[in-house]
């Protein structure tokens, strides 16, 4: 009986690891929209105007090339208006400083910094190189400012409507 439990546990672990590895390979080959079986729309990629994407289920935001020097144009689109959707930030920066974060708050001195979401400086969600992604699902109504911890002038905002 103990042997069967170990086999089941090892099987579950093997499946989880295989799934993560397969997902990583798929993400390298396909866009996030393709992976999730959804089409990206023209109004939510590389557009620096407010994007109304309410009800689409998923919104893609790009961290654009040269983002460190672009302030509120570093994340595109910005701001975004959504309705309880998943937001996928993709690091598309090809500059000499391509490491960025997506951190909730109005800046480094915000006492609530990182409390709602944070891609972080390390770990699997860190946006260290071109092509890496961070995903967060918004369930609450409100305005959610965010910034890059490494380049605090990079700012964005997610507006969630009811």
Image (spheres, grey):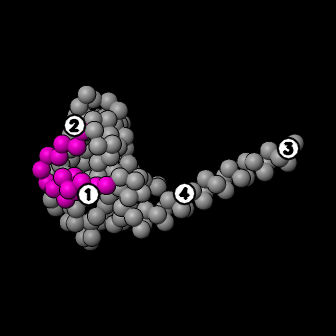
Which of the labelled discs sits on residue 20, or is there none?
4
Residue to which mark 1 is pinned:
62
36 or 108, which lies in front? 36
Name the residue at 66% across, 52% down.
13
The x and y percentages for residue 161 are: 23, 31
Give the spatial CA distance, label 2 vs label 1.
17 Å
Disc 2, SS: strand
Bounds of the magenta span?
39-54
Residue to which mark 3 is pinned:
2
State whether residue 114 appears in this view: no
Disc 3, SS: helix
- Circle nearer the N terminus (4, 3): 3
The x and y percentages for residue 4 are: 83, 46
Q: Residues within 10 Å of mark 3 (few under 14, many from 20)?
A: few
Disc 4, SS: helix
Q: Quadrant of the C terminus?
A: top left
Give the spatial CA distance, label 4 vs label 3.
27 Å
- Circle nearer the N terminus (2, 1): 1
Give the spatial CA distance, label 1 vs label 4.
23 Å
Seen as rendered, the residue at the extreme left is 49
The x and y percentages for residue 21 are: 55, 62
50 inside magenta stretch: yes
Q: Is residue 10 left or right of residue 126?
A: right
Give the spatial CA distance, label 4 vs label 2.
31 Å
Which of the labelled discs sits on residue 159, or is there none?
2
Disc 1, SS: strand
Query: Do the residues under discs 1 and 4 have CB atoms within 8 angstroms?
Result: no
Name the residue at 32% across, 30% down.
140
Give the spatial CA distance, label 3 vs label 2.
51 Å
Is 108 located above or below residue 94 in the figure?
A: above
Name the residue at 40% across, 53% down.
37
- Circle nearer the N terminus (1, 4): 4
């Amino acid at each position: 009986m103990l042997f069967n439990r170990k086999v089941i546990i090892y099987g579950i672990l093997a499946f989880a690891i295989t799934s993560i590895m397969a997902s990583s390979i798929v993400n390298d080959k396909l866009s996030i929209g393709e992976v999730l079986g959804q089409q990206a729309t023209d109004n939510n990629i590389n557009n620096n105007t407010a994007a109304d994407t309410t009800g689409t289920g998923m919104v893609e935001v790009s961290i654009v090339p040269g983002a460190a020097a672009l302030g509120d144009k570093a994340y595109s689109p910005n701001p975004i208006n959504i309705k309880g959707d998943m937001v996928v930030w993709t690091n598309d920066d090809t500059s000499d400083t391509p490491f960025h974060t997506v951190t909730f708050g109005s800046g480094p001195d915000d006492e609530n910094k990182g409390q709602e979401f944070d891609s972080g400086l390390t770990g699997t969600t860190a946006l260290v190189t071109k092509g890496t992604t961070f995903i967060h699902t918004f369930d609450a109504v409100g305005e959610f400012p965010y910034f890059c911890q490494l380049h605090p002038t990079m700012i964005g905002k997610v507006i969630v409507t009811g």
